[in-house]
Image: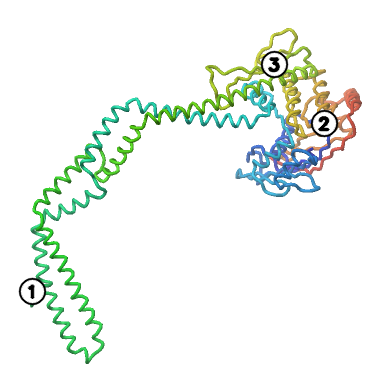
Amino acid sequence: MLTQLQIRDLAVIEEVTVDFGSGFTVMTGETGAGKSILIDALALAVGERSDAQAIRAGAARLEVLATFEPGSSSPANRWLQDNDLADEGSGCHLRRLVSADGRSKAWINGRPVPIQTLRELGATLVDICGQQDYQSLRHRSAQRDVLDGLADHAELLDQVRSAHAACITAEAALQELTASQRDRDSRLELLTFQLGELNVLQPRPGEFAGLEREHTALAHRLRIGEALDRAIARTYDDEETSAQAAIGAARRALGEVLRFDPELEHPLRVLAEVEAQIGEAVDQLRQRVAQLDQDPGRETEIADRLAALRESSRKHRCTTDELPALRERLQTELTQLSAGEVTVEKLAAAAHAQRSTLLALATRLTAGRRAAASSLSAAVTKNMATLGMPGGQFEVRVGPLGDSAVTAQGADEVEFLVTTNAGQPPGALSRVASGGELSRLNLAIQVVATATRGAPTLVFDEVDAGVGGAVAEIVGRRLRQLSSGRQVLCITHLPQVATLAEQQATVSKATRAGKTTTTVRMLTSAERVEETARMLGGVTITEQARAHAAEMLAQGRSGDLGDRKPGKTKRRAGRSS
């Protein structure tokens, strides 16, 4: 159960610590005092979504610490043991911190954990039913979620979602390929023709640039040849004035005096290397001369090849360098289309198999929902009688979706039907139930749901909204009965509910020097009389109201369910804008 809740810098709370006991505890206070902040804080502690806007004005961050005492054999304790997060002998501490920049951090027993891990543990410790849950019951999607939660087939739901996604993917692939097959024959004919041309052309990577360089050289063959002849003559052929002759003469001159000056050995060696390099260069120049003179028709051949490559690139709307890759792509497409009939058959078989798997899983899901619907209908109808709706009937209808559809949530349409008066036909809950009836129906459903989920702490935020008088007392007694097996915390505005609780905390708000602060404290017996009188009366609390309050509290104590640990609160006044 929840034993302590510490809150710092959340909304209009600067700092407050509340100690809770077992059994039934109510939280009361004027409208707008901030009672729901306590539930918001607890929700943060167990991993619900955070919002930096909830940080108290002027503070850099908010912090919440919730302490629980899970039983040794409880699901929460087993979870802690399985995840190596147990803290022997000191309960279970969940800490949440939210910074002004929106970042959120979480700890379990002092060890940092992801928010999802905190949420997993929180689900085994507390079950929170907020005000938004009541109104969401009007929507069929929420009704389906309630039924699925009671059916306890989360794994099957995940399988249906996965199978649906796989089915959609397989059928989309089949549809896409089938559409492409409609013009298969004409496409095959075009591909065959285009590949025939490209196979004749045989374009090669980098070919065009190389041919252009060679064509430029051949177009200026005479001028290049003259330059080559002059270069060969000046470097080698002329025995008197060529570079080769000059370097040879220099080498010979140095060689004659080398024995007198050994320092000349290095420049002499350099001259020898230069002479050898000139010889190599001349050999290459002569080879180039031979190439230019070798094939007089080469220039025309290259020009024709360049023209053919340009024409093909223009026809296919690509560059000449892209022609080889285009040829490969067309060949791949032709191969795929040629084997297309086999591929379509394979995809059709795969899509059929995925659809069959989805239908089989959806059928199992439908069976589970119908079984859960029968149980939920009977259980809620029974609880309606104890919540001031004798003769009322509750029915969960599970029917097929239109056009035999199957979605990621299965093949069913779930709808809650209700009649609150004997002899009346059932109608859709969204249209038939009043606000007060919706609150009681939600409580009836929660009673059934909590029996399934088994969280040791139940939290209700104004589950008694829209009711009053004798019905309010009935709701309070039902909550009191729930607390015989677990801890129940409830925010209420009704004295009929509050006086049936074993503990009562009051939430109050005050403004000092233009700053607003909210405080929380557990009430003594005498203070409970005053708070109950306030809830009963108007602006002025009369002695008559106090007497009535004392009587109601005495009646509430007369149905005591056993000794409970008293709760208390520690607080430090805080300010917030």
Pointer 1 residue: 238
* Above or below 379: residue 299: below
The amino acid at mark 1 is: Asp
Q: Position of residue 61 (x, y in %)?
A: 66, 45
The amino acid at mark 2 is: Gly
Mark identifier at residue 485: 2
Placement of the N terminus among the 4 image quadrants: top right
- Residue name at image x 64 percent, y 37 percent: 49
Inter-mark Cα distance, 1 to 3: 117 Å
Q: Position of residue 335 (x, y in %)?
A: 33, 36
Query: Which comes before the other along the chain, label 1 or label 3?
Result: 1
Local secondary structure at mark 2: loop
Inter-mark Cα distance, 2 to 1: 119 Å
The amino acid at mark 3 is: Glu
Query: Which comes before the other along the chain, label 2 or label 1?
Result: 1
Instruction: State left or right for residue 109 relative to residue 269.
Output: right
Pointer 3 residue: 395
